[in-house]
Image (tube, coloured by chain):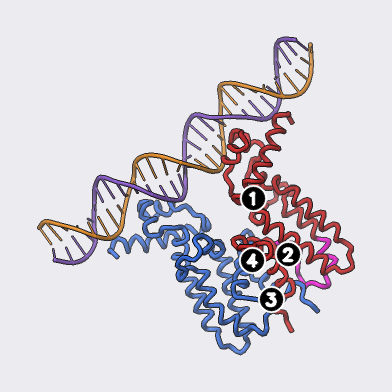
Chain colours: A blue, B red, C purple, D orange
Amino acid sequence: MRADAQRNYARLLAVAGEEIALNGADASLEQIARIAGVGSGTVRRHFPTRHALLAAVFRERVDSLCAHAGDRIGRADTRAALLEWLSAVTTSAATIGGLAVALNRACATDPGAAHEHCATARLTEAGEPLVAQAATALAPGITITDLLAVVTGLALATEHHTDPATEADRLLGLTFAGISPAR
Amino acid sequence: MRADAQRNYARLLAVAGEEIALNGADASLEQIARIAGVGSGTVRRHFPTRHALLAAVFRERVDSLCAHAGDRIGRADTRAALLEWLSAVTTSAATIGGLAVALNRACATDPGAAHEHCATARLTEAGEPLVAQAATALAPGITITDLLAVVTGLALATEHHTDPATEADRLLGLTFAGISPAR
DNA sequence: GTACGATACGGAGACCCCCGCCGTTTAGCA
DNA sequence: TGCTAAACGGCGGGGGTCTCCGTATCGTAC
C-alpha cells in the first residue's frame, strides 16, 4: 500500500469514527470525505460499501469484545461468565453510536460473501464457547445467534433513551433471568 | 375537508401502506406521490412529517392491537394474557414492514408533543392494565415501557431473518420465561 | 346558474446524498 | 532522474427532501 493511501486510510478511519458516533451508521460519506479533506472517490476506494467502512471503524472494539469472551472461557461460573460477556457486548452496542445498527444489518446484504471481517460473524464465533460451556444453565434450544439477536435488539430499542447503556443492560438482565420466570 | 382532499388522503394512505410494506419505513415519499398520482407537495401537506404518515398508515393495526389488549383484561391467567398480547404485538411488528422501525423511533423526535396519536403511547396505555394485573407473576420493576422496548427490539433484530415473525416470537417466549432461568 | 373566496394542488428550485467514471497527479522503484 | 502503476479528486447523472408560490378547483352564497 502506498504511503499516501495509508495516510488517507488512517485519516478516514478516524474521521468516520467521530462522524458515525455523532450521526449514527447512516452518516454521510460525502461529509466524512469533506472533513478528512479527500475526494469522495477516495472514500469509496478504501471502503467500497458502507458496511466495509462500519466494519473497519468498529474493528478494534469488536476485537476487544472477542478477547473479552476468550478470557471467560473455562471459568467456574459459566452462567455468570456468559452474562458478563453479553452485558459487555450490550453496553458497547448501546454506547457506541452506529454499532448496534451495524450489527443488525451485518451481512444482511450479500449473504454467503466473505464473512471473516464481519463483526457479527466474529462475535458469534467468539461467543459460541461461552454458550456451549453454559449450556446446562440455559433454556434449551438457545444459540449464540439468538443471544446476539437479543442483545442487538435491546441496544436498538434503547437507542433513543436518555441513558441507553444502563437501560439496555437492565433489560438484558431481566430477559436473562426471565421477564416472568416460571415458578 | 374538501372532497378532493379526502380522495387524495385516502389514496395516499393506501399507496403509502403498500410502499412502506415493500420498502420499509424509509420508503420514498416522492415515489409514493408519483404512484398515487399527486404532487410531492400534496403528500407533505397531508402528512407534515414522516412520522405522521407512519402513524396514519399503522393506525388501524394499532387500534386492533389495543382492542386485543382490552379483551384480555380480567382473564384468570394473567400471565398468559400478557404473554399472548405481547406475542400478538411482536408478530405484527415483525410482519408488517416498517412498523417496528416506526415504533422504535416514535416520539423520539419532538418529545412532549401531542402523543395521543402516537402508536407507542397508545400501545403503552392499552398494555398497562395487562401488566398491572400480571404484576405478581413478573420480575420486580418491569413496566409496560420495558416490555414494549423488548418487543420492538426483537422485531428489529429479526428483521432480516427468513421468517421474522416466528423468530421474533420464539425469542419473546425465551426472554419471557428466561434465557437462563434461575434455578 | 353564476360568481367568488377559500382551499388544495402541483411542481419548480435549492440543497444534499450516493454512485460510477475518468483525466490527472504522485509515490516509489529502477 | 525518469517512468509506470497506483491513488487521487471531482464531475455528472439519478434520486430524495423540503419550501414556496402561482394556479386550478371546490363549495357556497347569492
Say what amino acid the circle numbered 3 marks: Ile
Q: Regarding mark 2 in the picture, which secondary structure is present there?
A: helix
* Residue stretch in magenta: B128-149
Measured from the top left, where is residue B56 in percent x and y?
Answer: 71, 45
Work out whether mark 1 precedes mark 2 in sequence or the reverse, and give the earlier one: 1
Query: The N terminus of chain A is located in which quarter?
Result: bottom left
The answer to whether A163 is drawn above or below residue A27 in the figure is: below
Identify the chain of the residue marked 1, using the numbered disc in the image: B
Q: Position of residue A153 (x, y in %)?
A: 63, 65
Spatial distance from mark 4 to mark 2, Cα to Cα? 11 Å
Q: Earlier in the sequence, mark 2 or mark 3?
A: 2
Residue named by callout 3: B179
Residue at numbered disc 2: B147
- Residue bearing the label numbered 1: B21
For discs 1 and 2, the disc positioned in front in the rendered view: 1
Disc 4 element: helix
Residue pointed to by mark 4? A154
A81 is higher (above) or lower (below) than B43? below
Q: State the separation of the CA atoms marked 1 and 3.
A: 31 Å
Are discs 1 and 3 less than 8 Å apart at CB? no
